[in-house]
Image (cartoon, rainbow, N blue to C red):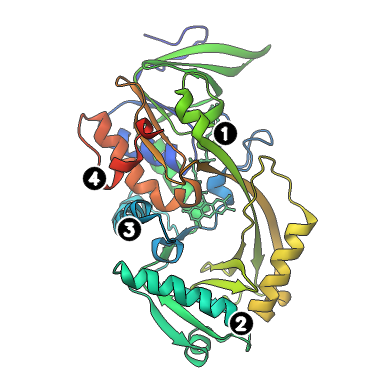
Amino acid sequence: MPAKGADRDVDADVIIVGGGVIGTAIAWRAARSGLTVTLVDSAGDGPGAGDHRTANQASRVAAGMLGPVSESVFGEEQLLNLNLHAVDRFPSFNRELEQATGKSTGLRTEGTLAVAYDNGDLAALDRLTDFRHSIGLAAERLDARQTRRLEPFLAPSTRGGVLAQGDLSVDNRRYLAALQAAAAAAGVQTVAGTVLMVGARQVEAAVPGPDGPVRITLPARNVVVAAGHATRDIAGVPLAVSGAIRPVKGQILRLRHPGGLPNLLTRTVRAMVQGRDLYFVPREDGELVVGATQEERDDRWVTAGAVHDLLRDAEIAVPAVSELVFAEASAGLRPGTSDNGPVLGRADGDGLIVAAGHYRNGILLSAVTADAVNALLHGREPHPAWHPFTPGRF
Ligand SMILES: Cc1cc2nc3c(=O)[nH]c(=O)nc-3n(C[C@H](O)[C@H](O)[C@H](O)COP(=O)(O)OP(=O)(O)OC[C@H]3O[C@@H](n4cnc5c(N)ncnc54)[C@H](O)[C@@H]3O)c2cc1C
């Protein structure tokens, strides 16, 4: 059945709401498995387009760390289990993506080095390392000399570090662009529009028409809501789920070597500077991502204070950053939830699936989210690591 109210043929097996890494990864895998897929995104014609609510998708703003070990904290063992499943899966998913598109996503495998700059920070790092060892994670303690031998541009005041070899990183913008290209090549149809309401077998969306927005109904056998933090604004998402999702603002910087020379750092560095967390994610092309703030706000302003604080701490940790070119400051909204875990599963026992709330780990979790939703679409159970994260838990 064609869409009502507009001259479009969008009758699909699946409609996916949201074209960030989560929705696009799901769309690619679903189309590759033989389903007809329509993806509706309010950002319209690709990354960077749209109004201020959509121009800064979290997926573009992110740093691209795939760091289950260095992200693990006390009390989140089920999430750690899911994140470890995700980092195991990511390289093969990424390889297939690179082969499908001929595009490199900049995956890096040098691990994460966590660094402390005073005794208090070193003690905090030690406690986290003890916890990580107690649950069987590999994290190697290094003294100050060993730490600086790995990363000579770290400040001489470095007190010591911990190397997590299992962590990866990816250039999230190149990764998203590759997902978009792969989805298009696999036959995913894209509709520029804002979904207002979802049901088990249809969505209602406002799409641009010649005389202003037109409201259309798109039918499908399954609807997947993957709209990041904005999932909570869509009518028809169960109230328990929308009530659990909250935006968590993050401000982040992109610096660049002026002469296109190699990066200052060779691996992700997480620094603790006077109790404050900071990270550096180097790219092969000389970009150095420095982040990020964590604020319970839902605006996307880049503030002078945040830029100042990030640069001040960055310079304490890696003094040579002051020589780099300031390329970009941006802000995005992480899709947080009340228990910090993602939400994945059927929301109504019928055709409506939610895949949202990926909070600080959406890039990392994108491949296993696509696998899990694809399993549901084909009547199979997702991997057991997903079981604690169903919509029904709220
Ligand atoms: C500063 C910062 C750093 C981060 N660093 C990392 C990191 O290092 N590693 C990591 O794994 N994760 C990181 N994250 C988290 C990660 O970015 C998110 O978890 C992930 O991008 C969520 O992806 P998403 O597709 O669900 O949401 P988004 O990327 O926000 O995409 C949602 C999409 O839905 C669309 N949409 C919204 N509402 C509607 C609607 N009503 N109709 C149609 N379309 C709609 C939007 O246009 C958008 O394209 C970071 C986030 C931030 C902000």
Q: Few, some or many C-alpha atoms within 10 Å of disc 2 (few <14, some 14-19, many ≥20)?
A: some
Q: Quadrant of the N terminus?
A: top left
Q: Few, some or many C-alpha atoms within 10 Å of disc 4 (few <14, some 14-19, many ≥20)?
A: few
Secondary element under disc 2, as helix, strand or loop, is: loop
Query: Which mark's residue is nearer the viewer, 1 or 4?
Result: 4
From the viewer's perspective, tell me whether residue 319 is left or right of residue 97: right
Distance of label 3 from label 1 (alpha carbons): 34 Å
Cβ atoms under marks 3 and 4 closer than 8 Å: no
Q: Which residue is mark 1?
A: 45
Q: Is residue 383 visible?
A: yes
Q: Amino acid at mark 3?
A: Leu
Q: Which residue is mark 3?
A: 84
Q: Which residue is mark 4?
A: 384
| Residue 389 place in picture, x, y as percent | 35, 40
Q: Nearer the viewer, residue 361 or 41?
A: 361
Q: Few, some or many C-alpha atoms within 10 Å of disc 1 (few <14, some 14-19, many ≥20)?
A: few
Query: Which mark's residue is nearer the viewer, 2 or 1?
Result: 2
Seen as rendered, the residue at the extreme right is 304
Q: Is residue 145 above or below residue 182?
A: below
From the viewer's perspective, tell me whether residue 362 is left or right of residue 376: right
Secondary element under disc 3, as helix, strand or loop, is: helix
Tell me if the residue at label 4 has its CB under 8 Å from ligand 1. no
Question: Which residue is rendered at x = 56% and y = 26% of the image?
Answer: 233
Distance of label 4 from label 2 (alpha carbons): 41 Å
Q: Earlier in the sequence, mark 2 or mark 1?
A: 1
Query: Which mark's residue is nearer the viewer, 3 or 1?
Result: 3
Q: Amino acid at mark 1?
A: Asp
Distance of label 3 from label 4 (alpha carbons): 13 Å
Q: Which residue is mark 2?
A: 118
Query: Which mark's residue is nearer the viewer, 4 or 2?
Result: 2
Quadrant in which residue 155 is drawn = bottom right
